Structures are given as C-alpha cells and as structure tokens.
Amino acid sequence: MKAWIDGRMVDAEGAQAPMLSHALHYGTGVFEGIRSYGGAIFKLDAHMARFQRGADALGMKIDREAVAQACRRVIFENDLGDAYIRPLAFYALGSLQLDVAPLSVHQAVFALRWNSHLGTQAAQEGIRVKVSTIRRNPLPLKVTGAYANSVMAKLEAARSGLDEALFVDDRGRVCECTGENVFYVRRGEMIAVHHPDALPGITRETVMRLAKCGERETTLEELLDADEIFVTGTSAEVTPVCELAGRRFEIGSATRRMQELYRRLVQP
Ligand code: PMP
C-alpha cells in the first residue's frame, strides 16, 4: 500500500520515523480516522477541521490543504473503494525537552482496508461493554498521547472478556467509550450523551441530525435504565450495545433504524 509522507508517495510498510522522535516519547502527534465508501470520502472537511484543532493545541504548524489532498490521493493511487484513512502529523527531531519550538514536523496519510475495529459481528449482535475503572482524560481532541488512556481502558475490558469500555466520570456521569460516542433510547426518546470531555464525534453529529434527537448529560444510572444503547464512530458506524455492566440490552427497532439510515447516507 502506498502512503503519502511529507509530499511524496512511498511504500507504507517501509516508512520509518527516528527513535528520538518527540512524539514517540511524549505523544505529541495528532491524527484522524476517516472512511471512504466506494472511493468517496465521508465528511473530509469536518475531519480536517478537528485535525487542525489538535495541531493548534500542540502549537504545530500543518498544511491542512495538503493533508486533505493527500487523503484523496491515497484512495485514488491505491485504487481503494471502502477504506480507512489515517492522517497523522507529529513532532520529530530537534529536542527532547517539552518546548516544541525547535522541533521538526512530519505529516503523513495512510490508507487501510479496514471495516469496524469492533469486528464484523458487532453490527449484528452488539457489543458487551464494561464500565471502566479508568477516568477519561479531559482532552477531547485526537492527540496521539491522549489515547494511552483509551488503550488502558480497552485493555481492562479485554481482560474481563468484554469488547469495549465505557468512561464514567467521578460524579457518575457517562462520558464515552474508548473510540465511540454513546446514544440511548429511554421511554421512546433517543438521546445523545453529552459530556465536556468526550470527543465531538463526526458520526455523533451525523446521527443526531438523522435522528433529529437532542443531547443530554446522563448518569450511569440513567443509562442503565435505557431500553436501547448504541455507540457511534467513523470506524464503529452505528453499533448496538447488548450488554453493559453485566445487564443485557435489547437491540431494538430504533437502533436498527439508525444503522439503516446511516448506511444509506454513507453509501454513495
Ligand atoms: N470518541 C473517541 C475517543 C474516538 O476516538 C472516536 C473516533 N474518532 C469517537 C469518539 C467517534 O468520533 P467520530 O465519529 O468522529 O469517528
């Protein structure tokens, strides 16, 4: 597979970064996760805007237009239809101090043949979710270092034999999963969970518009009282939750309808 790195198309597998790269030591990178369906890239501008916000938070200068163009190019040059696109910008050499001013920046875009990271069964059968003992860090951006938090929560869930972890804050409010936002249906109403630390998901926004539903701060207790729960993400799309905190949940008609509406929207 060919990747775009700093303006050139190269062999993705052979691409290397130096061991002294700042991002490797401190997680000073920013990334995106984007999908193409039948060669058409879904919501590229929204992903690029979020990418820019992450770069800005790190004081990193990126060429947003070049990266957007590279997203189109990796799909075209690898002759991909349905794919996952991974832009990445990171600090590399210049210093191992925390001041980023002297550091070089690299920009890359990779493409992968990838469907849901939750597995092919997930959309049909639902996922089993653990309430994480780990707190979500308050950085709702796709900064690479912040994802060690998600990795640890995911590991904890996997050790319990479960598929995903749900972050809840110290006041008992639901935040999000390790790589997806949370929705639920309660007494006939569909609601998107709102939390200030949750990533502003592009799929979340899309589904809220499709469902014409509102958002609300939600406690774990309220979520456990829901009739249906599902999660959303670029990779996960709309994935039902069949178990949370040991309780079983129906995969109901509202969740199935959202899966169908989302599919219809993304397919060109
Ligand atoms: N939360 C987190 C922590 C994520 O990593 C993702 C995936 N980007 C999401 C939510 C869903 O966001 P989106 O719909 O933009 O992919």
Image: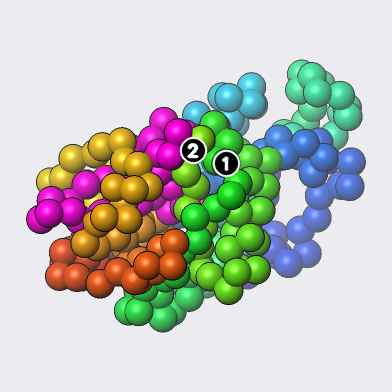
The relative height of residue 179 versus residue 28 in the rendered view (above or below) is below
* Residue 70 in view here: no
Q: Badge 2, how many Cα within 10 Å: few under 14, some, many 20+?
A: many
**Could you say where residue 86 lies in the image, as x and y percent from the top left?**
55, 54
Asked whether, in this view, residue 259 is left or right of residue 180, the answer is: left
Quarter location, residue 188: bottom left
Q: Which quadrant: the C terminus?
A: bottom left
Q: Which residues are magenta?
A: 171-199
Which residue is nearer to you in this view: 23 or 218? 218
> Mark 1 near mark 2, Cβ–Cβ under 8 Å?
yes
Q: Secondary structure at mark 1?
A: loop
* Residue pictured at 57% horizontal, 41% vertical: 135
**Could you say where residue 68 lies in the image, as x and y percent from the top left?**
47, 44
First-in-chain label (1 vs 2): 1
Disc 2 residue type (three-letter): Asp
Identify the disc placed on residue 135: 1
CA distance for labels 1 and 2: 6 Å
Quarter location, residue 63: top right
Q: Badge 1, how many Cα within 10 Å: few under 14, some, many 20+?
A: some
Which residue is nearer to you in this view: 255 or 108? 255
* Residue pictured at 16% horizontal, 64% vertical: 254
Q: How many marks?
A: 2
The relative height of residue 24 versus residue 3 in the rendered view (above or below) is above
* Residue pictured at 55% horizontal, 40% vertical: 136
Q: Secondary structure at mark 2?
A: loop
